[in-house]
Amino acid sequence: MKDIEKRAAEALRETLSRIPFLKILEITETARIPGSRIKENKEADAALIARVRVPSSGDQLLVIEVENSGQPRFVNRAINHFLRHKDRFRNAYCIIMAPYISPRSAEICRSEGRGYIDFSGNCSLSFKNVFIEKSNYPSLFQEKRELGSLFSPRATRILRVLLDNPGKIWKVQELSRKAKVSLGLASNIKKKLMEQEFVTDTKDGITVKEPEQLLSKWAENYLYEANMIRSYYSMKSIAVLESEIAGFCKKKGISYGLAGFSGAARLAPAVRYQQAMIFIESDAIGLIESSMKIKPADRGANISLWSPYDEYVFYGSREVNGIGIVSPVQLYLDLNRYPGRGKEAAEALLEEVIRPAWKI
């Protein structure tokens, strides 16, 4: 057996042994069973066959597809492979194994009626009188760290472009120019997006397939604290501060945009807020502070200026009643995990602004 097959066989045996009434009859690599090899293509990684005995229910054949990656693309590939061989294994229960099965891949398996086991401790099996499920074990393998690179500052420029242009088909060269990143990075991010099945690849280019799932995964990996946030106090009202700073930035040619609750209130008002929030290009923070005569404040602040972690925070900005606002996607990211009623404001944006735009 290959190393991954040995690891898979060990994980399978360990998982099945947790079921006290189940007896394992055999676990073998499928090439050793004449006529039962389910792996014919070169992309395949491994396959196992197991036979178990369930009291009062009889014997059960388990067909296990082992993949080097548990990303959705490979999970769907394994499921399709099972379907092509369903006549050969008519009464078998199909299981997908990989070093790590992500929550999204796990949901794919459940929706297709397939079991799964990974080498990180997660599993879900349901056949005859057997049901076992363990979840929320973190990845012990490189795959999770690789997914993190999809949400690095420069990589997310590509995500902004894709999510702000629903339905558009992009060539990689055009996408790299629009996002102002290298062609190499754009190609690498395209590959990762395809592996996660967030995009569809056609002869004309790629387009977003699952925009909401992509945004949700990005939000899980995003921290609003990545932006430098400075808090201030002013005697002026929040509305006056927002208006005056917007006018000053326009006059001076400074990149800005209402952020957080300030921006959300213009697009999908859902909650009251007590502090103006404004993205300002980093080099202009000092100028705004002195010109607007606002004072740094640790307590009782009624305005915060956000210095963006990347200039593409301003991508997709728009104006409402003459005041600039960062994109709905950026507002959602910043509010989703913001203390207080941030989650509520983020969900209102998703429901009233973002989802309708994706349906165009």
Image (tube, rainbow, N blue to C red):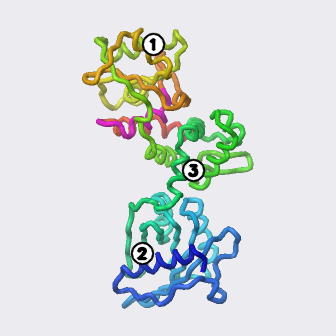
Q: Are marks 3 and 2 in contact (CB under 8 Å)?
A: no
Residue 338 inside the magenta-drawn segment: yes
Q: Secondary structure of the magenta portion, mostly? A: helix
Residue 344 inside the magenta-drawn segment: no
Label 2 sits on a secondary structure element that is: strand
Would you name the residue on which mark 2 appears? 126
Q: Any mark on residue 198, and which?
A: 3
Q: Magenta span covers which residues?
A: 326-340
Q: Amino acid at mark 1?
A: Leu
Residue 224: image quadrant is: top left
Mark earlier in primary sequence (2, 1): 2
Mark earlier in primary sequence (3, 2): 2
Height in image: 104 above or below 325?
below
Q: CA distance from mark 3 to mark 2?
A: 28 Å
Q: Position of residue 86 (x, y in %)?
A: 60, 78
Height in image: 280 above or below 119?
above
Location of the C terminus (image quadrant)? top right
Would you name the residue on which mark 1 appears? 287
Residue at image location 64% in from the left, 39% down from the top: 168
Q: Alpha-carbon neighbours of circle 3 within 10 Å: few (<14), some, or many (≥20)?
A: many
Q: CA distance from mark 2 to mark 1?
A: 63 Å
Label 1 sits on a secondary structure element that is: helix
Height in image: 297 above or below 78?
above
Front of the two marks 2 and 1: 1
Q: Amino acid at mark 2?
A: Ser
Location of the N terminus (image quadrant)? bottom right
Q: Position of residue 339 (x, y in %)?
A: 31, 37
Height in image: 75 above or below 148?
below
